[in-house]
Amino acid sequence: MALSYYTEELKKNAAALAQPGKGILAVDESTKTVGKRLASINVENSEENRKAYRGMLFTTPGLGEFISGAILFEETLFQSHTDGEPMVKKLETLGIIPGIKVDKGLCPLPGGKNVETFCSGLDGLVQRAADYYEQGARFAKWRAVLQITEDGSPTNLSIKENAWGLARYARSVQESGLVPIIEPEILMDGAHDITKTAMIQEAVIKEVYMACQLNGVLLEGTLLKPSMTVPGAGCPKKADPQKVAEMTIQTMERCVPSSVPGIVFLSGGLSEEAASVYLNLMNKIERKAKWNVSFSYGRALQHSCLKAWQGSNTKAGQKALLARSQANSEASKGCYIAGSQPSSDEALFVAGYSY
Ligand code: 13P
């Protein structure tokens, strides 16, 4: 099917995902990564346990008031809840749009520097996206990763390759009716300061939109999922929340076209509380463009929830998830009061993190 067949639907679904006061729940950890999460609460990484955990998340009463979409791993998109009803149906009941991670992970970039990667999964993507649409998915995610190093990463090669991959992906899934979430993550690894992050992030995001232009991506039917403009985790000068908010909005204003309906940040290893506080401060700044500025958090929505759940405590897990979802919903409107909802200050940063 040509992209033009889906134009109105893509715009409608992108607008629904970016509606004010709501954000996205990222639960698309690969089987290996979710295994690390489950191991942290001594739960075995079996299909039954993954189903129990994600089934608990997707039956949280009232979650749809704060969450517009949930990004799933392929296993979950085709999985049923323990009660037999498909997970997709559970989400739809809550008014949450199901999405799917479509990339096939990072590979070393030939010709790039040590840490540099490209994101794989373009082959056969139009057809795979059509299969996911058939299964109920209405949006997709592709995560490209760049790292700032003292020896000159990201190189121009890696910026161009990752931008091109994101744009090719975006166009491919739009041809099958899925709204692409375009995710160029700049890792927090490194000791660089916030000015350096801003400079690199501007170069990366501008390149992404140039590649989108060349690939004919319908911008009104996309969302951007960037990292926030923060100093490296090892930077001696610690992040000042107001400065992070101002620099992040400045970066977005310099790079993101106003036809993009929403920017949904990743949490990238920030603590739950920091992720909410930074988002809240961003939403207090008057902006030049009208994009909705919200969240698409993984770790910063699930950390307390996993701890509360402990493998079987459904009510406690759901309560923790709802608390962080509400906090971030408030932050997306600039009215979050720090500490008003239970949260964790624990930094969730892990060097060289893979999702
Ligand atoms: P974090 O919020 O844990 O960074 O994850 C979001 C995500 O989906 C990364 O691809």
Image (cartoon, rainbow, N blue to C red):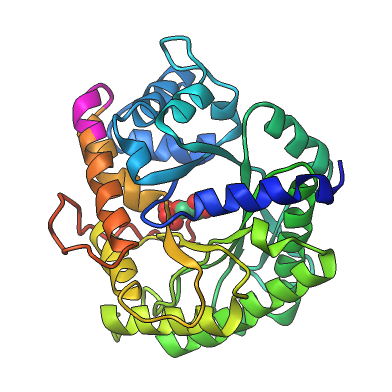
In the image as oriented, which residue stretches furthest toward the top?
Answer: 84
Residue nearest the observer in this picture, 139 or 19: 19
Q: Is residue 10 magenta?
A: no
Residues 184 and 31: in front is 184
Relative image position of residue 34 (x, y in whole percent): 44, 37
In magenta, the rendered stretch is 311-318
Please, is residue 86 above or below residue 212 in the view? above
Residue at left 25%, top 21%?
312
Predominant SS along the magenta part: helix
Q: Is residue 326 above or below residue 263?
A: above
Q: Residue at x 34, y 80 (%)?
A: 285
Query: Would residue 313 be found to the left or right of residue 125 on screen?
Result: left
The percent coordinates of residue 53 (x first, y second) are 37, 27
Choose top left, top right, bottom left or bottom right for residue 330: bottom left
Name the residue at the right extreme. 2
- Residue 314: percent from the left, percent from the top? 25, 24
Q: Where on the picture, by quarter, is residue 311?
A: top left
In the picture provided, is 125 more to the left or to the right than 232?
A: right
Q: Determine if residue 175 is in view.
A: yes
- 204 up-or-down from 21: above or below: below
Residue 40, position in %: x, y?
Answer: 30, 38
* Occupied quadrant, residue 336: bottom left
Q: Residue at x 62, y 84 (%)?
A: 152
Q: Magenta includes 317?
A: yes
Q: Residue at x 54, y 77 (%)?
A: 148
Can residue 355 be seen here? The reply is no
Q: Is residue 149 left or right of residue 351?
A: right
152 and 18: which is toward the camera: 18
The quadrant of the picture occupied by the N terminus is top right
